[in-house]
Amino acid sequence: MMTVYVNDRECEVEESLSVLDVTKQAGIELPTLCKMEKKDAIGACRLCVVEVEGARMLQAACATPVRDGMKIQTQTRRVREARKTLVELLLSEHCGDCQTCVRSGDCELQDIAREMGIREVRYPGERCAENIDDSTPALIRDGGKCIKCRRCVTVCGEVQGVGALYPQGRGFSSTIGPAFTMDLDDVPCVQCGQCAAVCPVGAISERTHLDEVWEAIQDPNKHVIVQTAPAIRAALGECFDYEPGTLVTGKMTTALRQLGFDSVFDTNFTADLTIVEEGTELLTRLKTALVEKKEVSLPLFTSCSPGWIRFAEYFYPEFLPNLSTCKSPQQMFGAVAKTYYAGKLQKKAEDLTVVSIMPCTAKKFEAQRSEMNDSGAQDVDYVLTTRELAEMIKSAGIDFKNLEDGEMDAPMGLSSGAADIFANTGGVMEAAIRTAYELVTGRSLPMENLHVKPVAGLEGIKEASLTLSDCLPDWSFLEGVDLKVAVAHGLSNARKVLEALRSGLKEYHFVEVMTCPGGCIGGGGQPRLTDDSVRLKRIDAIYREDEGKELRTSHNNPQIAQIYHEFLGKPLGERSHHLLHTHYTSEKNN
């Protein structure tokens, strides 16, 4: 510990902290546009400058370590004028019309300018050239709005381990983007949207499909179906000034009906379906390996996260056979909606429009993949993020806070608590373990509240093992087998798991990978800005949703039994295989 002085107030602090950490502990929030949680400071924006006694120049608080006896001033005239000048310089070259910018009202640069009392830009001059990159189905980049904070570079390179974005050039002509100023579609971008989630301005945003969805709703010849991912219910409220982690499932359902959707369903239904199909696939592969002694691709990897799928296609194609052949819950829903549900409505697939509300921008890309049309039409027509749904509700003038709680429609609205926890890192693994354990042993998991705690939480890589005993006769080959599982969230952590498997350092039977930190609750389409404190509140909300349900295991969902009886036949059966499964191909050399 050491003693420092912040605005003449004595503070006892740890020696490993930065000045920015110390001022925050002292209750002072310094402005910053480049610093990211748990990542090394780069001092790119310089807005957090402070005056340190004995230093000739102002110091960037984020990049300055504290030392014993340091005297820090955060609000001197010199500091305030420097910060104001820095913001004015950023505004002078920022090519952004706040009246129509997608980030207006949700822009960190705009907020800081307002807090500093900036009413005019004193330094008119050349502005950055507008450079629109709309090459991908999920994201749009506008180089003219970029303020070179490099947050996108940090999250893409360090958190996701993809490295699609780089700083290039010098001075005013410097740019942030793919190498050689190429478009995103020309480089290995997984379209996860974490860059859009951390961008402080409107330089990177999701490609919106709001106009197309409104047009479909107003088309009398279309029956428009909406599905909502489990993560939405724990985050949508933040767009309406609720605390993070507030569950708004019922209000969301009512809002969707008032918007004009003809059927309101839950992606959780097909999350339950995914567990049945994927669990059967895992047990089948284990049987092939342990009983038939045949070579089979293990470990089995989850396949519900499209950014992870793209990451494997680009960087680790040798592991593609290890991916579950199951489509994601979003795509399973589209396939059964345009076949099973269309049949109940006595309509053709092309008469239905399926809209997804997702926490993920990569879902926009996934919906347009060429493999995703087994219903005879594009399985999912449009994907909206949580942010887009909030915009849609506000544009319709709906008083969200005063809505009554509604219920999802049947037959694809009933789901288990196991489906809810798909939103969290470790949730798919826990849901699969709940079902697999019960199917193999005939008993429920001997866990408090059914939670598998070793795979929960925000640790980047989590491991667990489960030894099966007293197995039912059909599963006797698993007696005494120590099933080893792993969970990774954030693609840089997925890379570590893959490298450990490649080198033979690790051995698993089943691995869950989520693209975004925290899982879907931290997706690239969720309300900004998401840090670990917000992630934990959303995770807790999802667990509360699970614990509040009588039905806690996927295979016991009666509507899942119904769709197999009436339509699919059996897990991994012919119709299930056609509609619910797919394969992926290497993109390494593309």
Image: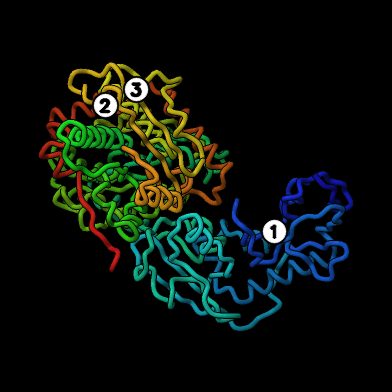
Image location of residue 140, percent across then percent down = 42, 65
Upstream in sequence: badge 1 or badge 2:
1
Mark 1: give few (<14), some (14-19) or many (20+) Cα within 10 Å: many
Instruction: Label 3: state its secondary structure.
Output: loop
Q: Is residue 392 visible?
A: no
* Drawn side of residue 541 relative to residue 273, left or right: right
Image location of residue 317, percent across then percent down = 28, 57
The quadrant of the picture occupied by the C terminus is bottom left
* Residue for point 58% across, 73% down: 94
Name the amino acid type tagged 2.
Answer: His
Residue situated furthest front in the rendering: 504
Residue in the foreground of this view, choosing between 372 and 484: 484
* Residue for point 22% across, 45% down: 325
Above-or-below relation of 150 to 29: below
Above-or-below relation of 300 to 217: above
Question: Foreground mark, 1 or 2?
Answer: 1
Q: Which residue in the protein does label 2 denote? A: 555
Name the amino acid type tagged 1.
Answer: Cys
Image location of residue 236, percent across then percent down = 47, 43
Badges 2 and 3: C-beta atoms under 8 Å apart? Answer: no
The quadrant of the picture occupied by the N terminus is top right
What colour scheme was applied to this rendering of the protein? rainbow
Q: Say the numbered circle drawn on residue 62.
A: 1
Q: Is residue 293 visible?
A: yes
